[in-house]
Amino acid sequence: MMKHSKTGLFLMELIIGILFFSLASALCIQIFVKAHLMNEESIMKSQAMKIANNIIEIYKNDDLDDYFTQEHQQIYFDESGNNVSLKEANYIAEIKEDDNQISITISCHDEVVYSIDYQHYQQRTF
């Protein structure tokens, strides 16, 4: 009888150990998945900021009319920030231009990733 109770105790310890490591591994997997998603989101936002800043620099140099001709415009970019067609686009920049202000909204997969307004002040000469 003594031998039977030691075997039962060993099996109980083994089951508890397996349960503990299963829970720990499930938590680790969740943490890795969350970290991966946060990294992807960070990369997406960083690229959207670069695209918006490039558009603002073009606007500052008064070259925006060379790129766009309408009041409400969209331009398409790939993952590297290069101009592409709509079919190849990962990012869509929507641009609204008023007197001395430009509003840029960058979307990726139909989700707004980054938005910025820029006011361009022109120096007056007397």
Image (cartoon, rainbow, N blue to C red):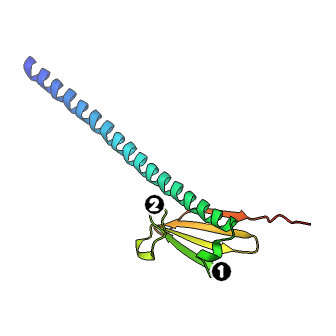
| Circle 2: residue type | Ser
Near-viewer residue (30 or 112): 112
Establish if 117 lies above or below 4.
below
- Percent coordinates x, y for residue 101 in the rendering: 73, 69
**Picture residue at 30% right of the left edge, 39% below the top:** 25
Q: Sort mark 2 into few (<14), some (14-19) or many (20+) by Cα contacts within 10 Å.
A: few
The residue where tag 2 is placed is 80
Number of disc labels: 2
Q: Is residue 120 left or right of residue 116?
A: right
Q: Is residue 1 visible?
A: no
- Percent coordinates x, y for residue 67 in the rendering: 59, 75
Near-viewer residue (26 or 93): 93
Q: Sort mark 1 into few (<14), some (14-19) or many (20+) by Cα contacts within 10 Å.
A: few
At mark 2, the secondary structure is loop
Q: Quadrant of residue 31?
A: top left
* Comes first in the chain, label 2 or label 1: 1
User: Which image quarter is the N terminus in?
Assistant: top left
Contact? badges 2 and 1 (CB < 8 Å)? no
At mark 1, the secondary structure is loop
CA distance separating discs 2 and 1:
26 Å
User: Which image quarter is the C terminus in?
Assistant: bottom right
Q: Is residue 16 left or right of residue 64?
A: left
The residue where tag 1 is placed is 71
**Picture residue at 61% right of the left edge, 60% below the top:** 53
| Circle 1: residue type | Glu
